[in-house]
Amino acid sequence: MASNFSFKNLAVLALALFAFCFQATLGEVTCEHLDQDTCAYAVSSTGKRCVLEKHVKRSGEEEYTCRTSEIEADKIKNWIETDQCVKACGLDRKSFGISSDSLLDSRFTQMLCSPQCYNSCPNVVDLYFNLAAGEGN
């Protein structure tokens, strides 16, 4: 009876471990698997920022792809920015690349520094803080 009890515990433990690993695998953010509506401001499971790119085919048709950049986020992984943060921070989901140019626009910096953005959207604040710091180098 004791061996039967341990076998059941082992089976339950193995099942729980499998379910946890399976769920963790499904929850990973891979930039190349994101569409144009979720790519910008996302951070992959490796901590690299995702970047939206536009390619024009020979036919003139535009094609959007998401790829992993070399820019690492500080302490953020597996993150797809919420629509609330995109709106609160004055961002555009269809922005291409990663640039500090928007920091020159006073309306943008006003939204970035607003309590709705600054206090609720650490990923966005981290991105633009690091872009600004990089401009000073």
Image (cartoon, grey):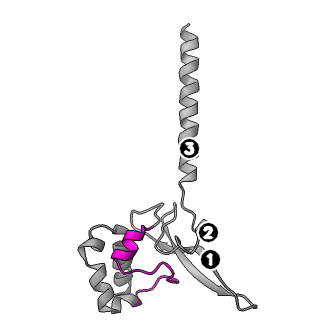
Asked whether the beta carbons under mark 1 and mark 2 sit within 8 Å of each other, the answer is yes
- Residue sitting at x 57%, y 52%: 26
- Write down the residue under mark 1: 65
| Residue 28 numbered mark, or none | none
Query: What is the distance, in whole Å, between disc 3 and disc 2 at their CAs?
Result: 22 Å
Closest to the observer, 22 or 133: 22
Residue bounds of the magenta highlight: 81-101
Identify the amino acid type marked 2: Glu
Depicted 110 relative to depicted 115: above or below: below
87 horizontally vs 68: left or right:
left
Q: Position of residue 96 (x, y in %)?
A: 52, 84
| Residue 32 numbered mark, or none | 2
Q: Quadrant of the N terminus?
A: top right
66 horizontally vs 116: left or right:
right
- Write down the residue under mark 3: 21
Closest to the observer, 36 or 10: 36
Q: Quadrant of the C terminus?
A: bottom left
Q: Is residue 51 magenta?
A: no
Farthest left residue in view = 115
